Image: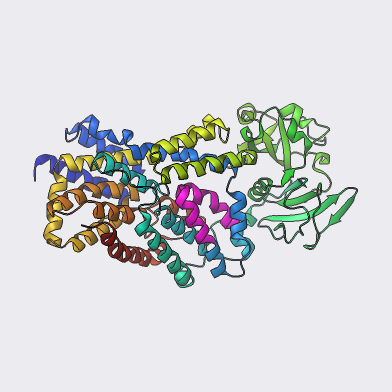
Amino acid sequence: MGLEALLTLAVLLLVLGLLVFTRVAPDVVLVAGVTALLVAGVIGPQDAFAGLANEGVVTVAVLFVVASGIQQTGALDGLVARLLGRPRNQLAAQARLVLPTAVLSAFVNNTPVVAMLMPVVSDWSRKLGVSPSRLLMPLSFASILGGACTLVGTSTNLIVNGWLIDEAGLPSLGMFEIAWVALPVAVAGMIYMLVFGRLLLPERSAVLSVREDPREYTVELIVEPGSPFSGRSIEGAGLRNLPGLYLMEINRGDSVLPAVSGNVRLKDEDRLVFVGVVDSVVDLAKMRGLSLADEQLYKLDEPRPNRVLVEAVVSESCPVVGNTIREGRFRTRYHAVVLAVARNGERLEGKLGDVVLQPGDTLLLEARSNFLQEQRHSRDFYLVSQIEGGTPPNYARAPHALAALSLMVVVVAGGWLSMLQASMLTAGVMLATRCLRGDAARASVDWQVIIVIAAALGLGRSIQVSGLAEHLAQGLIGVVGGDPMLALATVFGTTMLLAALVTAKAGAVLILPVALVLSQDLGLAFEPFAITVMIAAATTVATPIGYPTNLMVMGPGAYRFRDYLVFGGPLSLLVWVLTMLIVPSVWSF
């Protein structure tokens, strides 16, 4: 083994060690590894930074923008609510969850799908009386299995496809080509989750429940004319037993309906007075068909999607103390509207505009985007903080976002445009139709993910140019002999192990050069090995490290590392066996 190959192996082992045994951020570790090889002269700048120009990497970045447009318009909110419904037991809840999640993840990148569904599923679990730990891991796994079925469902598939084009000289895979193996794997995986979920999933409470928040806000919403809530009972509309919320009364004309029964039917213009914690109030204010009752909200001189939600604690020196919100001309003074008030757990009576403000009151405000900068050092408020994810969806633009997404799927499936071309066109359409603004588009790109992928591609390139791939391939040949199936199974197992330890994308990129040389040395077609690497990396479920969605649900589901191994380990073995059975019959050696 030459000096360059030895240096590459040493750097690679050091990188793997740091990723597995330390808490150093993956992008920092991988960039450090590329830097070391660049300085040592193993790779040149063109190889080190080739990942930044890789078609798959650019496509992933653009798809972040597309996913943001879907989220910001709430385009899938209504569909998700109808699909989840109100199942009667835990098994039915899991069944209602995993199938829609898998289907959505096949067409919208699975990471934002989980980000969008996590709060919905957490609230849904509390309504059903089911532990979130019984639903959140199936949510993540279903998104991973569904995302593996198409070229756009997971960035791992895009990265592998980009590598095949740039490094192996193969044509791009079709939109649904990977589904020959991924779809049976996804179906079998969902059956596994439904059958064994009761036995293998832990029963735990989330680390923090919304009911543990001591602040209780009072908020007033109005049933919009023609709203889907009109004519439905409180129970039927899903507004009873909301997590962290209590429907205190309904104001209907001059009458007040206190301690509302679940059988009361809602009417247009009903004013609903809720009491609850901030996260639940924010979610409630996003519901389509309910609008915040304060008419001052519509007098703010900035479009609603551009505003922010802010919590502010009133100080003794605030000039509106002792006045009602209306008398204090709060909107005119601060260019912000009070949506709700919390006061030491008290339930405030009467309309929100008639509440007399006191020092220590916590206000939930909808304000212009520069409110925080203006008031952060103001003596009018003790504390000012923005609520993340509080901007209401721009539902008026939802049809445009859905049309753009459908266009992308159709043109790619029809082979008229490449994935990169279609995603850039879709992102452009979303910007042109104001589904999201330019600054939101820039902020939507997860640059840490992009850097991790680009740096991993640089490391993968070093494995090729240093000759290390040839040595590793020869080592594998010594293990598997000339048996194609054993070689394929070994590539799957190695990819699965690397992906579980150092993230799916890095694992795929590191093993692809070795798999290419292995197939060439054995005189076999590379396609079966490439597809095997893609499936092994894209279905990483045995550890929380391997895939972002697994990490995302870890805290809210109160999971431990071993929970992923217990529930995801057997699923990984099932995927392994199915891949070995299907791949050679579709992509021959």
Q: Is residue 528 magenta?
A: no
Left or right: 293 as drawn, with respect to 496: right
* Picture residue at 76% right of the left edge, 59% below the top: 234
> Viewer-proximal residue, 350 or 52?
52
- Tally of marks: 0
In the image, residue 435 sits, relative to residue 183, either above or below, namely: above
**Image spot of residue 507 (x, y percent):** 29, 50
Q: How is the image coloured?
A: rainbow
**Image spot of residue 29 (x, y percent):** 31, 41
**Image spot of residue 143 (x, y percent):** 46, 55
Residue 558 seen in this snapshot: no
Furthest toward the right, the residue is 254
Q: Quadrant of residue 321?
A: top right
Which residues fall within the magenta stretch? 97-123
> Viewer-proximal residue, 423 or 480?
423
In the image, residue 235 sits, relative to residue 290, either above or below, namely: below
Residue 585 seen in this snapshot: yes
Left or right: 269 as drawn, with respect to 515: right
Question: Magenta stretch: dominant SS?
Answer: helix
> Viewer-proximal residue, 247 or 86?
86
**Image spot of residue 377 (x, y percent):** 62, 28
* Picture residue at 77% right of the left edge, 52% below the top: 230
In the image, residue 193 sits, relative to residue 141, either above or below, namely: below
> Viewer-proximal residue, 6 or 108?
108
* Picture residue at 40% right of the left edge, 51% below the top: 150
Q: Quadrant of the C terminus?
A: bottom left
